[in-house]
Image (spheres, rainbow, N blue to C red):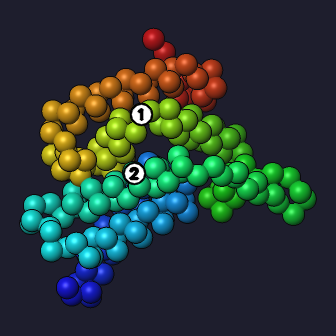
Amino acid sequence: GDLEAFNLLILRYQNLLYGIALRLLNDEDVAADAVQEALISAYRRFHTFRGDSLRSWLARVVVNACYDEMRKKRRQHSVPLELFNSEGEEIETSYWLVDPQADPELQFEANELQIAIQASLDKLPTIYRLMLVLVDIEGMSYEEAAAAAGIPVGTVKSRLARARLQVQKSLQLSGELLPAAYRIEL
């Protein structure tokens, strides 16, 4: 019930939790909302925490909030707003993330790679994407990912193997589109 102590815990894990939500939902605003809802829920239900891994428990709460957002999104039909710059041209990337000092060719290649990876992640079924996000992107152990997803460790391993294989195949299919340094040759 100590809000100060809970806030300190959240400061420690907020980047991890947001990263999980962002990779699952692929929308910055929706991910931020999901994390906020999850943290409110975690604070209210902190008495249910049994003392295992706090990181896994918080990740599980965020995963559940993401699932809730996905269900809401399926029920709601939405039309995305297109962003335009001052010349009326559509903005395709987040301009604040672009390094103005970077070589334009390297920026282009990095952007293409990011798009290919995200497209591969988006094609995955949610249960596989979750495993990739928790283990490969957020660096959780199999045990922590199992606790966060509420499944056995063996299931984490098999889903992760399937997810990696699907991403590999997806990236191979878009091999021509990838920068030469990132192409996977068979």
Residue 99 percent location from the top left of the image: 64, 57
Tell me which amino acid carries mark 2. Tyr
Q: Residues within 10 Å of mark 2 (few under 14, many from 20)?
A: some
In the image: residue 52, left or right of residue 100: left
Q: Could you tell me if residue 139 is visible in this image?
A: yes
Real-space Cα separation, disc 2 to disc 1, in angstroms: 12 Å
- The outermost residue toward the right is 87
Residue 92 percent location from the top left of the image: 72, 49
Residue 164 percent location from the top left of the image: 36, 29
Tally the numbered discs.
2
- Would you identify the image quadrant in which residue 51 lies? bottom left
Tell me which amino acid carries mark 1. Pro
- The outermost residue toward the front is 75
Residue at 44% in and 63% down: 34
Residue 84 percent location from the top left of the image: 81, 58
Residue hosting label 2: 67
